[in-house]
Every structure is written in structure tokens, then in C-alpha cells.
């Protein structure tokens, strides 16, 4: 099943088609309707933009929406590791939960962040990949441990909306934050800008590199699409001639799961907060952030409220990009004849 896990899995021409469709939808084009089909959205983590925009997109496409939330009185705790004895907190395994949901809906969207406890588990993207493996229907990634492809698609859409040239300089900057945050957004951002063929600079203090596998993927995407990728801690040179400053905080890979070590490492880095002085060193750059953002921690009020910021358009484009994406997912299902209700199979015991 195709689904949508990581933007970089799509050919650049296919991303361009989705972005063009998102911009048509934004300009008022009517989405296709898929009455009788259903979308499931399951959140293991909080959300404002993703939740609201997927709900709204479902309405625009005329599909039924099954909305589920984990935790509290939501769905059962779901185990995703194979071969475990389930005598702890989780009551259900993804091997049952995913295919059961796959019998109720036609496309399933999942949000499952990195736990930032086990780097191995987060790099395996264990819960998201459990759903992808077992659902039997297309699964859309609404932010996993590794990727936030819907955000990346909306961000590309936003840069096209603002007519940011393909070869413009794109700076992804680390910012201070009181908590260690997952890498899904910076991973998807650096790969998206590289796939768009931009001159991408990752500006970060020492100790805050993205994972080598992500930088390798971004580098390959840049090479294939005519862009460049640079990693630096030299703010002056990074900001010079920049057209986009994209801020995000992320945890140190070297301190993964060790909050005390992380706190000690980022002590002294509080001045990594995007200010008007940063923006004035650029080439009239636009400021982007996926939101939610902590004011005067990640970015100063004067930037967010000033002429540089395009974060509200960026958030709005989540709706148009996801409507385009879901439209293509449901359209591709229409082209396949699916037998959803499975017939009972005869019992055959092992010899
Ligand atoms: N950017 C983003 O995914 O926002 P939410 O976490 O509010 O959905």
C-alpha cells in the first residue's frame, strides 16, 4: 500500500504536482469528492494544526472521519515490539490494532512522536512502521519519530506561494528550548529544501548535528536536484544572503534519553533565539517555523510579529497540501478494486 511516509520517497515531479494542486485548492479550486470512503486519524501525541487540518480536509473531500486519540480514555495502549510478553501497560498489539482499523477505514493517518528514550527505537520509527506494516491500507504519516512529511509538503507549498527561487539560500537554524525535542521536523525540513534544489545551510551549535543517515539523504537529494548542503556553526556566514530562516529546536543525539546531560549541554546556548538582528543580516529573508513556537525563547516577538514572518500562511498551507495529498491517496484507491471484507479462511493446522 502506497501511503505517505517521507516526502523524499516521492519523485520530485510528483511533489511538484502535489504542490501545484495545493496552490490551486488554496486559490479556490474544488476538491474531488469520495463519498462512502473513510479516513482514520489516530494521535498518540498532541496537535492543533495537524488535527484541525486533517479534519477539515476530510470534510472537503466528502469522506467519513474516524478520529481516535491515545492516552486517558482513548484507544488502548499499543505495543509495537514483536515477541514481547505483554504484562506491562500496553493492552493491545499493533499486529491486531492496525489491521482492525484497516477494516474500518480506507486510509489511516498516524501521529507517533519519538519517545527520546531509546535512540534505536526512534531510529526504527517503531510504532509508525508497525502500523505501515500491518494496516493493510495506505498509512499517512502525521509526524513520526523520524519524519513530518505533511509539514514539509506544506512548507514547499509556502515557498512556491512566496515565489522563493529554487536556488535560494535556505537556513535551518537550531534554537534553544527548555526541553529536548524530536528530530522529525528538522529531518523533513532539511530533506525538503534539498529536494527543492536550494542552497541549504544547517546552522547549529556543536553537539547538535542531525543524524548522519538524514544528512546523507539530504545530500543525495541536493545533488540530484541541483542544490547544495552545508553544516556550520558560523552564524554570520550562514545568514548572509539567506532567503529563508527556518527555526527549530532539536535534541542532541549525544544526550538522547539523558535530560540532565542535555540540560548541561545547552546551558549557555540561550542566545540561539532568532532576533531582528539575525534577520537584518539576511537578504530580506522570510521567517518560517512549523508551530507551535515559544515566543522569546525560539524567536523574538519582533520577528514573529514583523514583516519577515510567514508562519500563519505556512500553517494554513497544511490544509491545502493535505487536501491535495489525501485527494491523490483516495483517487489512487479508486483505481484499484479493493475487496475489503475478508472471507473466513479454513483452519489448517501445522503438521
Ligand atoms: N506543525 C504541527 O504539526 O503542528 P501541530 O503539532 O499543532 O499539529
Image: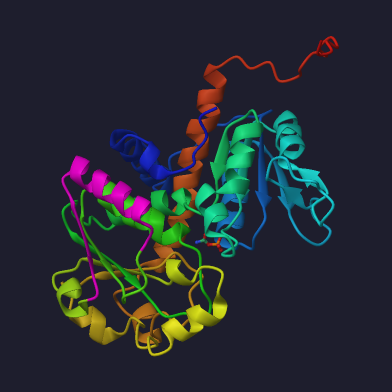
Q: Position of residue 25 (x, y in %)?
A: 43, 43
Q: Position of residue 289 (x, y in %)?
A: 40, 68
Q: Residue at x 55, y 49 (%)?
A: 125
Q: Residue at x 25, y 44 (%)?
A: 220
Tell which of 45 and 262 is nearer to you. 262
Residue 341: within the magenta?
no
Residues shaded magenta: 210-233
Q: Quadrant of ligand 1?
A: bottom right
| Quadrant occupied by the N terminus | top right
Above or below — where is 350 with respect to 19? above
Residue 228: within the magenta?
yes
Quarter of the figure with residue 116 = bottom right
Q: Taking the image as drawn, is residue 248 in sight?
A: yes
Above or below — where is 200 with respect to 205? above
| Quadrant occupied by the C terminus | top right
State left or right for residue 190 relative to residue 229. right
Tell which of 131 and 37 is nearer to you. 131
Q: Residue at x 31, y 39 (%)?
A: 16
Tell which of 319 and 12 is nearer to you. 12
Q: Taking the image as drawn, is residue 144 in sight?
A: no
Amino acid at each position: 500500500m502506497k501511503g505517505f511516509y517521507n516526502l523524499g520517497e516521492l519523485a520530485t515531479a510528483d511533489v511538484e504536482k502535489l504542490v501545484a494542486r495545493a496552490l490551486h485548492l488554496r486559490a479556490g479550486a474544488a476538491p474531488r469528492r469520495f463519498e462512502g470512503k473513510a479516513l482514520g486519524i489516530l494521535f498518540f501525541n498532541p496537535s492543533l494544526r495537524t488535527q484541525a487540518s486533517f479534519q477539515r480536509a476530510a470534510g472537503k473531500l466528502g469522506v467519513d472521519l474516524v478520529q481516535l486519540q491515545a492516552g486517558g480514555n482513548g484507544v488502548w495502549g499499543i505495543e509495537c515490539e514483536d515477541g514481547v510478553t505483554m504484562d506491562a501497560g500496553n493492552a493491545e498489539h499493533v499486529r491486531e490494532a492496525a489491521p482492525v482499523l484497516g477494516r474500518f477505514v480506507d486510509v489511516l493517518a498516524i501521529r507517533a512522536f519519538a519517545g527520546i528514550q531509546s535512540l534505536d527505537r526512534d531510529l526504527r520509527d517503531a510504532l509508525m512502521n508497525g502500523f505501515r506494516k500491518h494496516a493493510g491500507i495506505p498509512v499517512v504519516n502525521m509526524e513520526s519519530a523520524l519524519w513530518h512529511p505533511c509539514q514539509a509538503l506544506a512548507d514547499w507549498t509556502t515557498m512556491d506561494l512566496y515565489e522563493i527561487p529554487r536556488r535560494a539560500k535556505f537556513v535551518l537554524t537550531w534554537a534553544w528550548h527548555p526541553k529536548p525535542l524530536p528530530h522529525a521536523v528538522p529531518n523533513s525540513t532539511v530533506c525538503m529544501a534539498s529536494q527543492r534544489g536550494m542552497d541549504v545551510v544547517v546552522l547549529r551549535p556543536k553537539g547538535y548535528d542531525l543524524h548522519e543517515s538524514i544528512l546523507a539523504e539530504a545530500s543525495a537529494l541536493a545533488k540530484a536536484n541541483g542544490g547544495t548542503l552545508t553544516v556550520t556553526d558560523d552564524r554570520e556566514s550562514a545568514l548572509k544572503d539567506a532567503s529563508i530562516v527556518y527555526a527549530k529546536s532539536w535534541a542532541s543525539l549525544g544526550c538522547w534519553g539523558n535530560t540532565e546531560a542535555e540540560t548541561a549541554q545547552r546551558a549557555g546556548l540561550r542566545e540561539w533565539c532568532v532576533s531582528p538582528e539575525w534577520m537584518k543580516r539576511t537578504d530580506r529573508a522570510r521567517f518560517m517555523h512549523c508551530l507551535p513556537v515559544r515566543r522569546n525563547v525560539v524567536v523574538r516577538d519582533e520577528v514573529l510579529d514583523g514583516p519577515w514572518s510567514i508562519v500563519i500562511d505556512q500553517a494554513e498551507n497544511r490544509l491545502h497540501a493535505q487536501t491535495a495529498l489525501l485527494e491523490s491517496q483516495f483517487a489512487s484507491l479508486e483505481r484499484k478494486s479493493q475487496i475489503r471484507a475478508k472471507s473466513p479462511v479454513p483452519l489448517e493446522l501445522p503438521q
